[in-house]
Amino acid sequence: MDHVQTASTLPRRQLGRYLREWRSRVGLTQAAAGRLIEMSASALQRIEAGETTRLRGRDIEALCDVYGVPPETTAAFVGLARQANVKSWWHQYGDLIPPDFNVYVGLESVAAQIYSYQPELIPGLLQRRSTCTI
């Protein structure tokens, strides 16, 4: 039940995707990048997959330095790491939310829009009064 108490997965996944893209741009493997900053390849893989529960700013800065990331982008990545470490509103209800549902609550809380598909619903503008009499 410990992973229910972790922060939202969205910032971690975004950061991991961005770091993976930058590593690919410079043509490094996870093992090579890890050796350059004295981190194991498995630890770097967890960061890139958004699976690590605690991101350290100095690790992100070291990776950005190796990848040649511009300073303003590095600052944004460090900000994402800080955001990923902050617990969200639903963590106080960790005993009520099933562990497998934590990801969905986290994604919903940061969603800008939610779409709902209801094929059986006809919008009011398309409805008309029935003319049939029985």
Image (cartoon, rainbow, N blue to C red):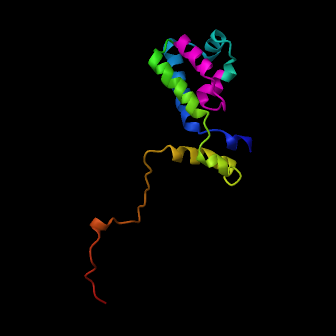
Residue farthest right in this picture: 1
Residue range highlighted in magenta: 44-67
Query: Residue 20's x, y, as percent?
Result: 54, 22
Query: Residue 112's x, y, as percent?
Result: 43, 45
Quadrant where the N terminus lies? Answer: top right
Give the left or right position of residue 59, taking residue 95 as reference: left
Quadrant where the C terminus lies? Answer: bottom left
Above or below: residue 65 compared with residue 49? above
Question: Of 92 and 119, which appears nearest the observer?
Answer: 92
Residue farthest bottom in this picture: 134
Residue 39 sits in quarter: top right
Give the left or right position of residue 133, taking residue 105 as reference: left
Kindly tell me whether residue 12 is visible in this rendering. Answer: no
Residue ID at (48%, 25%)? 76
Residue ID at (31%, 67%)? 124
Residue 120 sits in quarter: bottom left
Give the left or right position of residue 124, taking residue 93 as reference: left
Query: Residue 105's x, y, as percent?
Result: 58, 48
Task: Tell me, yes or no, whether the highlighted magenta stretch contains residue 39.
Answer: no
Kindly tell me whether residue 84 is visible in this rendering. Answer: yes
Question: Of 93 and 50, which appears nearest the observer?
Answer: 93
